[in-house]
Amino acid sequence: LDPHNPYLGEFLAKRNVRDTRVGSHGSSSSTGQQTTLWRGSTASNIGVLHPRVVSQPAEMAIMSAQKNILLLGSGFVAEPCLEYLQRSGNNRVTVACRGLDKAQQLASKYPCASAISLDVEDDAALDAAVAAHDLTISLIPYTQHARVIKAAIKSKKHVVTTSYISPAMEELDAAAKEAGIVCMNEIGLDPGIDHLYALKIINEVHAQGGKILSFESFCGGLPAPEASNNPLG
């Protein structure tokens, strides 16, 4: 997502996020023409982001550094994620899932990727895998995210999920802050991109003097051709 997107900016502003330049002692100054990167989580919920502003040369240095990324899962969402990660040429991605064959099948398509077999319910194995990487992206069922975050807290490594923040994940908020790690959540299609387009539609209605009486968002798979004869298809 483009950090300069006005709808993204307003969405984050509504979550009490501020565009400030944070100095070495936490002081703030105006952003000027600098570039905003997103990091979190210092608010009351895991995944609520606060921007950090850096100069363009600093941004390029950050982006050019090689990162070792653990990608948990090899389902339908994993390949688009892996394809995106390999674009920079600086990311080394380990695809991990319980079945090694499936992980190898996905990893073999991309030169930046390798595969391992990992059972996330094996705490020792999960801890070791998370500790060996700079970042973990969890695309496994949401019921396992809290387990992954616990492992990330132990090794003080960052973690990303696309899921809603469950009560089990929210309970780890204080521990994540203490460990100084970033836990980014709700940044997929739904939840995630749908939030931005919801705000876009609401703003357009308000700009024309309208009032929102109710709002429902539908997101999911495309209908089969024989069923695409209705307003939603």
Image (spheres, grey):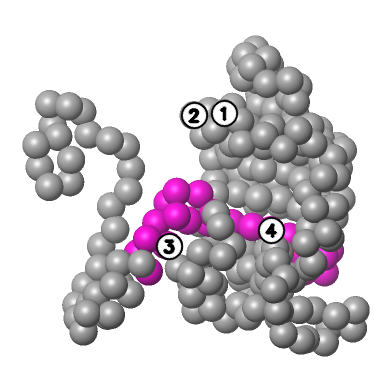
Residue 196, disc: 3
Q: Earlier in the sequence, mark 1 or mark 3?
A: 1
Residue 128 horizontal/vertical position (percent)? 86, 37
Q: Secondary structure at mark 2?
A: loop
**SS category of the residue bearing label 1:** helix
Q: At x 63% / y 68%, what residue is drawn?
A: 49
- Label 4 neighbour load within 10 Å: few <14, some 14-19, many 20+: many
Question: Where is residue 83 shown, x and y percent of the image?
Answer: 61, 30
Q: Amino acid at mark 1?
A: Glu
Q: Secondary structure at mark 3?
A: helix
Mark 1 residue crowding within 10 angstroms, few (<14) / some (14–19) / many (20+): some
Separation of residues labelled 2 and 3 (CA atoms): 23 Å
Q: Which residue is mark 2?
A: 76
Disc 4: which residue: 183
Dots 2 and 3: beta carbons under 8 Å?
Answer: no
Q: Marks 1 and 3, how far apart in space?
A: 23 Å
Q: Residue at x 47, y 56 (%)?
A: 192
Residue identified by numbered label 1? 79
Q: Which region is colored magenta? A: 176-199
x%, y% of residue 191? 45, 55
Choose between 52 and 164: the one closer to the eye.
52
Tell me if label 1 and label 4 are in contact, CB under 8 Å. no
Q: Are circles 1 and 2 on residues that touch, CB within 8 Å?
A: yes
Image quarter in which the C terminus is found: top left
Hey, what amino acid is under mark 4? Cys
Task: Give the Cα distance between marks 4 and 3.
Answer: 20 Å
